[in-house]
Amino acid sequence: MAYELYYWPEIQGRGEFIRLALEEAGADYIDVARVKGAGALMKLWQNAKVETPSFAPPFLVDGKRVIGQSANILLYLGERHGLAPKAEAGRIWTNQIQLTVADFALEAHDTHHPLGAAFYYEDQKPESKRRADWFRGERIGRFLGWFETILARNPKGPKHLVGARLTYADLSLFQMVEGLRYAFPKAMGRVEDGFPNVLALHDRVAARPRIKAYLASPRRIPFNQHGLFRHYAELDG
Amino acid sequence: MAYELYYWPEIQGRGEFIRLALEEAGADYIDVARVKGAGALMKLWQNAKVETPSFAPPFLVDGKRVIGQSANILLYLGERHGLAPKAEAGRIWTNQIQLTVADFALEAHDTHHPLGAAFYYEDQKPESKRRADWFRGERIGRFLGWFETILARNPKGPKHLVGARLTYADLSLFQMVEGLRYAFPKAMGRVEDGFPNVLALHDRVAARPRIKAYLASPRRIPFNQHGLFRHYAELDG
């Protein structure tokens, strides 16, 4: 039975980390709201019979299971599709890296919504500028530096974040680099060469046959001004 | 061999979710920076020989393993100390709830640091006011409502978040209620009676012998103005 992914149909957002894992796995899945509209998402989200409802999308349906929280969905898919080590130490380390990707992605989001979702970007522009200056000046380098370090320290070599094989964490780091290049092209252009292991991993992921096909397909929603990563020239520097 | 917990010695912060789990488990652990000072934390954090370094504290040392990210540490401890179901469905659901606690806790933190850690609270007071108004007005009720709902939908009854036994998610929800009461006494006083299952769970956790003993001990750091939860009268309403 096909997985059902429930996520907003018009953005990459947090759902994209799940889409990339499903695509790399060659899994049979339906991106429900893209096929049936956001109403189908709302319907399951608000269904009072679901014993494990999610606070927010994305959530994944696998038969009778409904699973939420991006990193948790990836933990689940990783075990099923060989996208994480089977041994506990590697599995836990992969999860730790994914949670750090999630923190990084949220900080990227907060550059355009520091006061929260109650206000449009247009109503928090000066605040966004202050937060984005810090994100560009300190946080991008600090996070990318951490990923560069753990790649360099991987006893199996710097080709993967965990061990000698691809994990969902590699896919997620690819997506972070994509998002940062979209949102902060000037800032990334200045600093990214300082993180050669991260860039090489990004390029290897992009060249994987299933990922390459996915990125070229209409299933990949282009970046836009509604998602996690947004490009506002005044926030780039 | 005792666990070693590495976290800031003067705050509850994110480390408190780990401390509560270790205390409830009756585990032998050393709260390293409280015993040896923050220098001991910095030393391991920056140790170039650690293959799995953390982006930020807390991290836990168990023999040769170094494990970071609060929810990930709890996933690890939960399996070892019976603080999560052994079966996958329950284990994944517990992790999903914990990640939602982490989101909630971060939003509580962001009320006093919406522009990030680059500025002191005193340098982002008007912004904090706007973000806190939204957090009090909408987010507290929305999050607590979700926890109330999942308690009510638990097929084993509303005494626990997952199944019929205590999990680390219960301990974490207890801590959220504690933190919100400290930071937002007026706002919580107005709304908390609307979440009777959440409050009853909080009280049951507080009455557990090991937790009760911990809370009364000097090991429990009092809430203060440096942690995740801070009380500023102007942010409560």
Image (cartoon, coloured by chain):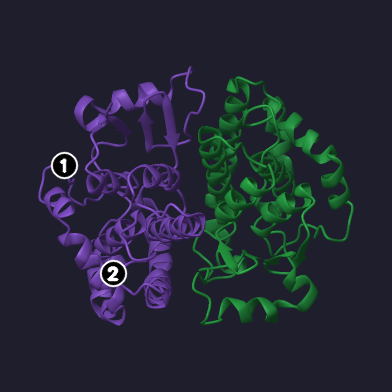
Chain colours: A green, B purple
Picture residue at 76% right of the left edge, 57% below the top: A223
A95 or B182: which is nearer to us? A95
Picture residue at 88% right of the left edge, 49% below the top: A213
Q: Which residue is mark 1?
A: B219
Say if mark 1 contacts mark 2, CB within 8 Å.
no
Picture residue at 61% right of the left edge, 78% below the top: A44
Image quarter in which the C terminus of chain B is found: bottom left
Image quarter in which the N terminus of chain B is found: top left
Residue neighbourhood size for the residue with mark 2, other residues' Cα within 10 Å, grouped as few (<14), some (14–19), many (≥20): some
Camera-nearest label, 1 or 2 = 1
Q: Which residue is mark 2?
A: B236
Is residue A93 among what the camera can see? Answer: yes
Protein chain holding label 1: B
Amino acid at dot 1: Arg
A49 or A20: which is nearer to us? A49
Local SS, label 1: loop
Height in image: B56 above or below B197? Answer: above
Height in image: B136 above or below B126? Answer: below
x and y, in percent, of residue A149 in the image: 58, 25
